[in-house]
C-alpha cells in the first residue's frame, strides 16, 4: 500500500495521510475541483522491498484519491 502526506502551507507542516490502494511511482495526477485527485498509470514494485531495487512494471490503472 502506498503512503501519502499532506502539506499545510499556512502552518508550513506535513502530516500523514492514508495512501492510495496501489503504491505507484512515476505516475500522472490531476487535482479535481472537489478536493480529490486522480492518479493514473506509472510503475509499481513487484519484487522484494529493498533499497537496491526490486522489480518495477508499468501499470495502466487509475485511482481516485480522497484525502481525509
Image: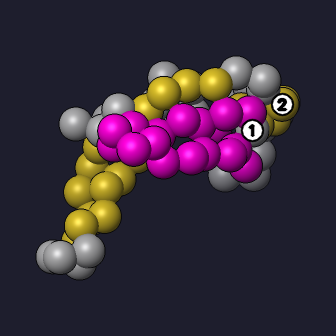
Which quadrant of the figure contains the C terminus? top left
Q: Can residue 35 be seen in this view?
A: yes
How packed mark 2 is, by other alpha carbons closer than 10 Å (few <14, some 14-19, many 20 or more), is some
Residue at 24 percent across and 67 percent down: it is: 8
Q: Does the magenta stretch include residue 53?
A: no
Which residue is label 2 attached to? 58
Asked if residue 21 is positioned above or below residue 29 in the image, the reply reads above
Which residue is label 1 attached to? 42
Q: Residue 32 or 39: which is nearer the viewer?
A: 32
* Callout 1: SS: loop
**From which residue to which does the magenta span run?**
24-41
Mark 1 near mark 2, Cβ–Cβ under 8 Å?
A: yes
Residue at 35 percent across and 32 percent down: it is: 66
39 with respect to 46 (left or right): left
Residue at 70 percent across and 21 percent down: it is: 61
52 with respect to 32 (left or right): right
Colour treatment of the image = secondary structure
Q: Is residue 27 magenta?
A: yes
Q: Which residue lies furthest to the left in this view?
A: 11
Distance from disc 1 to disc 2, alpha carbons, whole Å, reads 6 Å
* Percent position of residue 65, x then y: 43, 32
* Percent position of residue 12, x then y: 23, 78
Dot 1 or dot 2: first in sequence order is 1
Q: Residue 14 or 62: which is nearer the viewer?
A: 62
* Percent position of residue 55, x then y: 82, 33
How packed mark 1 is, by other alpha carbons closer than 10 Å (few <14, some 14-19, many 20 or more), is some
* Callout 2: SS: strand
Amino acid at each position: 500500500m502506498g503512503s501519502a502526506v499532506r502539506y499545510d502551507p499556512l502552518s508550513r507542516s506535513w502530516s500523514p495521510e492514508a495512501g492510495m490502494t496501489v503504491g505507484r511511482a512515476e505516475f500522472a495526477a490531476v487535482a479535481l475541483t472537489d478536493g480529490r485527485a486522480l492518479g493514473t498509470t506509472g510503475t509499481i514494485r513487484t519484487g522484494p522491498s529493498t533499497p537496491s531495487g526490486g522489480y518495477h512494471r508499468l501499470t495502466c490503472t487509475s485511482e481516485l484519491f480522497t484525502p481525509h
